[in-house]
Image (cartoon, helix red, strand yellow):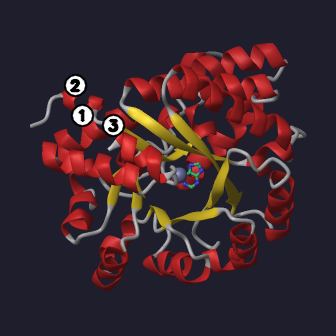
């Protein structure tokens, strides 16, 4: 089996990472103190002890509550700086960061502070760490589509580091079709499109994301493994999946890692990438996900190299940057 060092050193792109999901308990308390925000937990240990989830919603409740400590441009910059430093140490050379502006604007944080904070840290990382990247604005699918429309309009005033749009938050009951209009508008503005689909939701949500949103990658997408016809379509069309193994275990989308469909998808010819989703909450950064799938699924050096190569290939980096990274 490939060594830890081999797996961590593989040059990778991280394509499924919620920047708010990199908020570690110690930074949450530091920012709470600095900003005068009260967390409903007495200590770092007590907060960390809450990280035991029964499903996606139980995680989202804590995720939205804890991000209340993020208030200023500097907070978002510090959060992003810390993530990029850790990711770079695990082989990440390009990072496309999801962010949830509706969750910040609703708390009175200006979208400019969010975008400039994250974007500033990305610019620094490009210079200091050799990590390239950009932002993917995620619409909250459990909020009204009018709110998604408003946040897209606001974000388009700061298009510099905006690569695309995505769709996240509670999935079941909020099918992709609800967002066809706002995705069409984002694509008209020249943005890429991705969406979470088939994490907890059925394979039909993956089909909708492809047919009605025109997504170029599917986030999670693991429930495609239940539908041979859909796997064949993903393979034939070269649609990458951004798979997050440790997340799927922590949110009980799969019973345990040894039952994860990652290798079945790969064997069906689907383009698989490995990512961390919300690493502060799910027990590891992207390199840790590689180590875990080696240990639980027997992923070989050749398979791991293919996943890493696919991640760079499936990224929205310019062609010249991809060539440099391969
Ligand atoms: N799924 C859906 N929405 C999310 C997630 C996730 O894993 N993480 C942050 N928002
Ligand atoms: Zn996600």
Instruction: Tell me whether the residue at label 3 lies in contact with that at label 1, contact meaning CB atoms closer than 8 angstroms.
Output: no
Cα gap from disc 3 to disc 2, whole angstroms: 12 Å
**Circle 1 sits on which residue?**
7
Cα gap from disc 1 to disc 2, whole angstroms: 5 Å
Rendered view: 273 above or below 112: below
Cα gap from disc 3 to disc 1, whole angstroms: 9 Å
Q: SS class of the residue under badge 2?
A: helix
Residue 110's tag is: none
107 or 286, nearer to the observer: 286
315 or 171, nearer to the observer: 315
Judge from the rendering whether residue 296 lies leftward or rightward of residue 21; answer left or right. left
Asked if one can make out residue 12 in the rendered structure from this viewpoint, the answer is yes
Extreme left residue here? 1
Asked if one can make out residue 39 in the rendered structure from this viewpoint, the answer is no
Q: Whole-percent x and y of residue 156?
A: 81, 55
- Depth check, mark 3 against mark 1: the one in front is 3
Q: Which residue is depicted at the point 24% across and 34% down?
A: 7
Callout 3 crowding tier (Cα within 10 Å): few <14, some 14–19, many ≥20 = some
Judge from the rendering whether residue 165 lies leftward or rightward of residue 286; answer left or right. right
**Circle 3 sits on which residue?**
11
**Circle 2 sits on which residue?**
5
> Which of the 4 image quadrants contains residue 92?
top left
163 or 108, nearer to the observer: 163
Q: SS class of the residue under badge 3?
A: loop
Q: Whole-percent x and y of residue 30?
A: 69, 14
Count the marks: how many? 3
Instruction: Tell me whether the residue at label 1 lies in contact with that at label 2, contact meaning CB atoms closer than 8 angstroms.
Output: yes
Extreme front residue here? 320
166 or 38, nearer to the observer: 166
Callout 2 crowding tier (Cα within 10 Å): few <14, some 14–19, many ≥20 = few
Rendered view: 200 above or below 101: below
Quarter occupied by the C terminus: top left
């Amino acid at each position: 089996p490939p060594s830890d060092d081999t797996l961590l050193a593989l040059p990778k792109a991280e394509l499924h990472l919620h920047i708010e999901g990199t908020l570690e308990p110690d930074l949450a308390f530091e920012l709470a103190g600095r900003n005068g925000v009260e967390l409903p937990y007495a200590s770092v240990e007590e907060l960390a002890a809450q990280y035991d989830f029964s499903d996606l919603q139980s995680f989202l409740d804590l995720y939205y509550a804890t991000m209340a400590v993020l208030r200023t441009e500097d907070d978002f910059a510090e959060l992003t700086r810390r993530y990029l430093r850790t990711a770079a140490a695990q082989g990440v050379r390009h990072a496309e960061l999801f962010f949830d502006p509706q969750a910040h604007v609703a708390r009175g944080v200006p979208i400019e502070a969010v975008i400039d904070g994250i974007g500033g840290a990305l610019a620094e990382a490009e210079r200091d760490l050799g990590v390239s990247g950009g932002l993917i604005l995620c619409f909250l699918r459990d909020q009204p589509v009018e709110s998604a429309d408003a946040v897209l309009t606001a974000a388009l005033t700061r298009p510099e580091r905006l690569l695309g749009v995505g769709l996240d938050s509670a999935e079941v009951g909020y099918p992709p079709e609800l967002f066809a209009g706002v995705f069409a508008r984002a694509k008209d503005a020249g943005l890429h499109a991705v969406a979470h689909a088939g994490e907890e939701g059925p394979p039909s949500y993956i089909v909708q994301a492809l047919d009605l949103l025109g997504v170029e990658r599917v986030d999670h997408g693991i429930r495609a493994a239940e539908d041979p016809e859909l796997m064949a379509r993903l393979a034939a069309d070269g649609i990458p999946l951004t798979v997050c193994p440790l997340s799927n275990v922590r949110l009980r989308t799969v019973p345990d890692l040894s039952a994860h469909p990652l290798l079945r998808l790969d064997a069906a010819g689907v383009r698989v990438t490995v990512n961390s989703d919300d690493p502060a909450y799910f027990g590891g950064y992207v390199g840790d996900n590689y180590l875990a799938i080696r240990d639980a699924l027997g992923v070989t050096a050749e398979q791991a190299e293919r996943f890493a190569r696919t991640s760079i290939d499936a990224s929205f980096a310019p062609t010249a940057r991809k060539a440099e990274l391969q």
